[in-house]
Image (cartoon, rainbow, N blue to C red):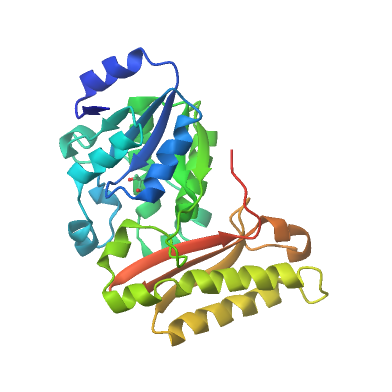
């Protein structure tokens, strides 16, 4: 594996490659990232994994400063999993001067769900991802389904700018008890970790309710809203601070207009705080890849 932190070397390395798959990360590599690397390898002869903690996308300073940085371990894991290039740019390479231009993300994405709680997060992610696309020119880029809203936005971005890049989504990888792997799990205390799978269990329960009731007369938006309320109450009663639990049509990123005909496209998304740690997760009613 080549470890590169400079544009000239990156360009000359990539010049000779046939097809390139990109896996962008902020480091603290875990099995979730590695599964994306292995997935990417099926679609291109060269897998480039980027590690860059993008300060501009953090809404809370503390979250940025405490974000786990484990570069030596990260590189070892990437190498074992056959990453071809680890691109680890210094801050001044990605932001050579104060960033004044940002991608404007449509409000139905940027102001809903995650967007309500994370300030300009989506615009900042779109901007850094675009920079990586311009530098690396990947044929394929792989994002995790755990960050569903981010993946949805990037897919739209790629459709509306001529990136010539296919976006693939990798499955969420979970611990044995169901907790989705995330760098932020390392912030959980022992007792918090013990109950951290509750959110996933509630989402799975909502999925089952949808599946079992999808043919009933009463399967409408009101029914779905009641499921959301029940899910939120359950989480809060367990001591979480729920930010949202929402059932949406994942193809259009909006509430279903006709749940009876749209049930296959539904996804349940949630974000909640457990102590000082903010966790997000989602469950699709029917698993699918978005290409
Ligand atoms: O999902 C992440 O780790 C980040 O948002 C990304 C896509 C690497 C952009 O900084």
Position in image of residue 50 (x %, y %): 30, 36
Going by the picture, which residue comes out furthest to the top? 16
Residue 254 image offset from top left, x and y in percent: 61, 59
Residue at left 52%, top 72%? Answer: 201
Of 185 and 88, nearer the camera is 185
Residue 173 visible, this angle: yes
77, above or below 227, in the image? above
Q: Residue 204 location in percent, x, y? A: 58, 69
Looking at the image, residue 118 lies above or below residue 163 = below
Q: Quadrant of the C terminus?
A: top right
**How many marks on residues?**
0
Q: Quadrant of the N terminus?
A: top left
Q: Which residue is found at the position 35% from the left and 30% from the top?
A: 48
Above or below for 73 versus 211: above
Please state if 126 lies on the left or on the right of 291 as rendered. Answer: left
Look at the picture and state if 168 lies above or below 152: above
Quadrant for residue 202, please give it.
Answer: bottom right
Residue 96 sits in which quadrant? top left
Q: Position of residue 206 (x, y in %)?
A: 61, 72
């Amino acid at each position: 594996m080549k470890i590169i932190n400079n544009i000239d070397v990156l360009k000359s390395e990539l010049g000779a490659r046939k097809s390139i798959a990109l896996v962008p990360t902020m480091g603290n590599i875990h099995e979730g990232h590695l599964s994306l690397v292995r997935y990417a390898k099926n679609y291109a002869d060269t897998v480039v994994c980027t590690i860059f903690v993008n300060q501009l996308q953090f809404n809370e300073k503390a979250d940025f400063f405490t974000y786990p940085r484990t570069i030596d371990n990260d590189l070892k894991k990437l190498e074992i999993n056959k990453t071809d290039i680890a691109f680890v740019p210094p801050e001044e390479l990605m932001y050579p001067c104060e960033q004044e231009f940002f991608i404007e993300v449509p409000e139905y994405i940027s102001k809903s769900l995650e967007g309500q709680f994370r300030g300009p997060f989506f615009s900042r992610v779109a901007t850094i991802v675009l920079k990586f696309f311009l530098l690396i020119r990947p044929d394929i880029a792989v994002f995790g389904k755990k960050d569903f809203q981010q993946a949805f936005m990037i897919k739209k971005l790629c459709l509306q700018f001529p990136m010539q890049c296919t976006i693939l989504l990798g499955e969420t990888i979970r611990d044995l008890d169901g907790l989705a792997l995330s760098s932020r799990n390392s912030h959980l205390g022992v007792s918090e970790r013990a109950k951290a799978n509750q959110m996933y269990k509630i989402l799975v329960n909502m999925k089952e309710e949808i599946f079992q009731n999808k043919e009933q007369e009463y399967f409408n938006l009101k029914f779905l809203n009641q499921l959301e309320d029940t899910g939120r109450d359950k989480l809060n009663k367990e001591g979480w601070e729920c930010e949202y639990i929402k059932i949406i049509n994942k193809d259009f990123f909006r509430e279903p207009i006709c749940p009876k005909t749209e049930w296959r496209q539904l996804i349940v998304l949630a974000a909640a705080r457990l102590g000082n740690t903010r966790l997000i997760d989602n469950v699709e009613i029917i698993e699918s890849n978005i290409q």
